[in-house]
Amino acid sequence: MGKTILINPITRIEGHAKITIELDEQGAVSDAHFHVTQVRGFEKLCEGRPFHEMPSLMARICGICPVSHLIASASACDALMAVRIPETAANLRRVLNLAQIIQSHALSFFYLSSPDLLLGMDGNPAERNLVGVLQANPELARDGIRLRQFGQQIIESLGGKRIHPGWIVPGGVNAPLDAKKRDEILAAIPDALAIAERSLKWFKPLMERYREEISTFANFPSLFMGMVNEQGYFSSYNGKLRIVDETGKIVADHLAPADYPNFVGETVEPSSYLKSAYYKPYGYPEGIYRVGPLARMNVIDGWRTPRAFEEWAEFRELRRGAILSSFYYHQARLIEILYGIERIQQLLSEPSILSKHVRAYAEPNNFEGVGCAEAPRGTLFHHYKIDENGLITWVNLIIATGHNNLAMNRGVLQVASHFIHGERIEEGALNRVEAVIRTFDPCLSCSTHAVGEMPLDIELVRADGTVADHVVRD
Amino acid sequence: MSRVLIIGYGNPLRGDDGFGWRVVEELQGTLRGGQVELIACHQLTPELAEPVSQARYVIFVDAARETVPGKLTLSEVRMPGGAARFSHYLTPGRVVEYADKLFGRHPRRVYLLTVGAGNLEVGDTLSEEVARMVPLAKEQIARLCAMMRDAAGRKVSDGDAWSLRTKTDMRV
């Protein structure tokens, strides 16, 4: 008789999920799945609300990446108002978005993943956590805390608070930046840059230790999607979308985010509250694609800042074509932290960043609006419809983690098939199954919203494991 | 270093769990004499280790489920022994431990002031029995500050350079 291995809960991720691994009679892995066990339902909760409340409401989806939702939501509201926001406001939104990318990536790398990277995938589970990192390498722990703090302090300074900040509103931002705040942020840049450089220097040689993980951690051909500007460089906001394949060839370019229904499809599986997105022209599930730091490294033609560009160019030499192994998400995150710090310095050094003209005003002029931003975990869509009174009638959210769902599932199966073999199940093998999920840095609280009526598959299992009843609602 | 750090923490949208925030909000501008920093936050995180390491005295303020609703309890916080089993949730003692291990310094004294929570349901108001304790908590904190001494042995409240730095993660 076959066996099912259950990893529940998955540790050191944001949100709640489990993994099931099916073994056949010979003890080989026959299937594996990533199940998200929580639902948030914001797509329904917001119906009936005035559209201008949406940024504030949407920020409450998440405590780690609220700024991404603020920006995508405000951008959707800008589209409803049919306004073009002042350039200073767009740059201030970028500063806040980059600050969030920095603090979120710091959380993912230093707090959630560095225990595995520093102490080893087979390290003692009792020590393989942030406390273990603190004891084994206090400087690394200190650097991680200070980097996260750097990003959070910018968010607090500009948005009023670290978690669920305000400031970003439909039409722009609600107050200009003052010189004192700007100078405080600029003063903190050198230390933050030094930490980012140090972290990359520490991490890159480590990759030699993880050759087996690199070759098996969601290492397969897929498409990659990310936002670029007119020059093909990374854009966190207000750009167009590009899709490349595993050879690095551009499959689709200059895609307007508002046209996403033409190229992004969504489907729901009964075993998870997380929707799966796919590239529509290729169909489901062949249209599997990835977003986020690794995808961005693959789709862009470069970075606007010098050190990030150098690191990226070196990164691209890892393989001819696109970099496929999801283990490289870790290094990609560190490069994005470096870019974020450099770019914030550039933006804040422009005199126009202190302009008082930071908001456009209008009533609704469209019944439908789409906003898009590159969040720490990848491309984020907010799509709203309103009635003639400006009240929300319909919401669709496509979150980065949803874009990555098919890839995460395939990654879990790949790792499980390689590291788990029948008779003996080693703890390190199970940790690797979790660790592949961690490379994607999923945000499950962000990404679980209903598509119409939720399909349900419920099993009533007796204590001896036999199924007493089974109910399915499609 | 003659600095006092007061950290009120909890969820201000879960009834009495907002007690720490309310105390910190009401302390702004009221403490006289000494260098006081106020922080209000949702939960204790590793990022607090550095400011804690730089303070001479720290007072944590929180609601507690285990005691009689409305009962104020003051206790001294010590660094816990042994390894932490769970890094997702930090206690005041663990924050102090992080301060010591990461930055090589920890405060001279650390206190935890809690109130027994009566209501932890969704809502942004304190229950009557807990709201009554806010002025008493402020008085308790003021008395604690009056006892604190700087590196030269002088009372913190007798110092010359007064500044009240407020850094809060204030709710909207």
Image (cartoon, grey):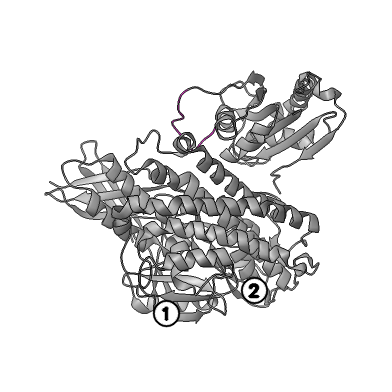
Q: Nearer the viewer, mark 2 or mark 1?
A: 1
Q: Picture quarter containing residue B106?
A: top right
Q: Give the image location of residue A135, x and y in percent.
A: 47, 33
Where are the magenta residues, as a range?
A: B82-91
Q: Give the image location of residue A322, x and y in percent.
A: 38, 70
The reply to whether label 2 and label 1 mark residues of one chain is yes
The answer to whether one can see residue B166 in this image is: yes
Please tell me the numbered disc located at residue A250. Answer: 1
User: Which residue is drawn at the image coordinates 52% and 48% (left, top)?
Assistant: A107
Q: Secondary structure at mark 1?
A: strand
In reply to whether residue A129 is colored magenta, the answer given is no
The chain containing the residue under callout 1 comes to A
Q: Is residue A128 above or below residue A277?
A: above
Task: Tell me the residue that label 2 is attached to.
Answer: A80
Give the class, few, some or many, for how many residues have Cα within 10 Å of label 1's Cα (few <14, many ≥20): some
In reply to whether residue B85 is colored magenta, the answer given is yes
Q: Amino acid at mark 2?
A: Leu
The answer to whether one can see residue A379 in this image is: no
Q: Give the image location of residue A62, x and y in percent.
A: 55, 52
Q: Secondary structure at mark 2?
A: helix
User: Which residue is drawn at the image coordinates 75% and 62% (left, top)?
Assistant: A174
* Near-viewer residue (A278 or B129): A278
* Near-viewer residue (A116 or A64): A116
Left or right: residue A17 compared with residue B99: left
Which numbered disc, 2 or 1, marks the residue that appears first in the sequence?
Answer: 2
Left or right: residue A63 compared with residue A284: right
Q: Amino acid at mark 1?
A: Ile
